[in-house]
Image (cartoon, grey):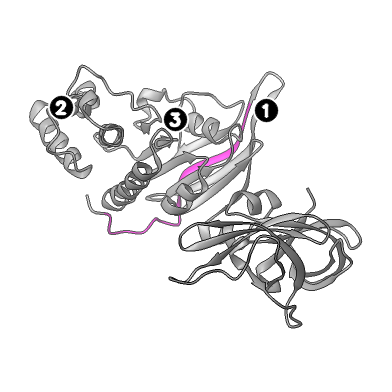
Amino acid sequence: MANDRTPSDAPFLSIRGLRKTYGSSVAIDGVSLDIRQGEFMTFLGPSGSGKSTTLYIVAGFQDPSEGTVQLAGRSLLNVPPNQRNIGMVFQRYTLFPHLSVAENVAFPLRVRGWDNTRIAERVKAMLKLVHLDQHGDRKPGQLSGGQQQRVAIARALAYDPPVLLMDEPLSALDKQLREEIQFELKRIHHDTGITILYVTHDQEEALRLSDRIAVFNKGCIQQVGTGHELYEHPATRFVAGFIGHSNFLPVTLDARRGGLADVVLPDGRRLPGAPLRCDTAAGAQAALMLRPDRLALLSEACNDAPCIPVRVRDLSYLGDVMQVHLSTSWDQELDIRLPLRPGTTPPWQIGSTAHLSWDSAHSQVHAAA
């Protein structure tokens, strides 16, 4: 079952022009996406953004108002859910409490008419895959939440589906257990090579698990890319604010030069050469995005990089970093994260004045809110 291949460039699962309405309410509109075979694709977005609706249409639990879904070149829209042969794992484990772990995993195989010998071999392999081969005789109620979710994953994989759909499967678990199961999911994906569509609102989870991420907002996909692409090159202000943490300074776009923009801050300070990520015209309002981890706090002003005076409002010790809450001369609040060396004490105190500096190449100009 080892996965010794990388995802093919050819689309394996193709979603085209999906639209879903409930009366006058639009749940998704114009959702199109190609997923490669063997890819771990995550649908990421806030509640109500359309990510689960898209997943349920692929599963067959909902019918689209418009659009198509094809798996390996075959339309799924007229295929009943139980005949799509697609695996599904939900937030709730949906295990049968009266059946043992092994019997839960065997259930979909019995429904498909497998013989007992083949079922026994497959159940053994699945429980070994999810590291529960010593727990086959236990009932779900005797397992931890993380173990129950692994049983649900083993059951969904047992009949070797071409695609595994996962809808917020870890959101009910605590942070440490969530991270443990995330590691297990990555291992299982690597070992099986199965195509996974994964829904979450947790950006860190999406970044940790995914080959690519589709960012949803208000029923549409805003951007698709690797975690690195989305973090370093967000296409919209929404993506910039949703992937990672960001500060947005209000600016006036002074001039456009190719892919760069000169901007003016509220205090009149002019900053040249920030990468431009919107179609805003010169003279219009925009927003300068600054990542908290790309900022430096200096005791004196510098002349070789953008630099603005700030006041320290609060300090939070987070172990390897110090989160510093600042305010600008025009009373805007923003946060930065400064790495801490072992045994050192940060020089800043609440009420201190300082200068905030950054590399222009690490800033971006987006549309105003």
Would you place residue 344 above or below residue 180 in this image?
A: below
Residue at which label 1 appears: 26
> Where residue 120 sits in the image (x, y, percent)?
11, 32
Q: CA distance from mark 3 to mark 2?
A: 30 Å
Is the residue marked by circle 2 packed among few (<14), some (14-19), or many (20+) residues within 10 Å? some
Q: Are marks 3 and 2 in contact (CB under 8 Å)?
A: no
The label nearer to you, 1 versus 3, is 1
Q: Check residue 10 for magenta coloring.
A: yes
The magenta-colored residue range is: 3-20
Q: Amino acid at mark 1?
A: Val
Q: Amino acid at mark 3?
A: Ala
Q: Say whether residue 277 is left or right of residue 148.
A: right
| Point 19% across, 23% down: residue | 110
Is the residue marked by circle 3 packed among few (<14), some (14-19), or many (20+) residues within 10 Å? many
Q: Secondary structure at mark 3?
A: helix
Residue at which label 3 appears: 59
Q: Residue 351 versus residue 64: which sits nearer the camera?
A: 351
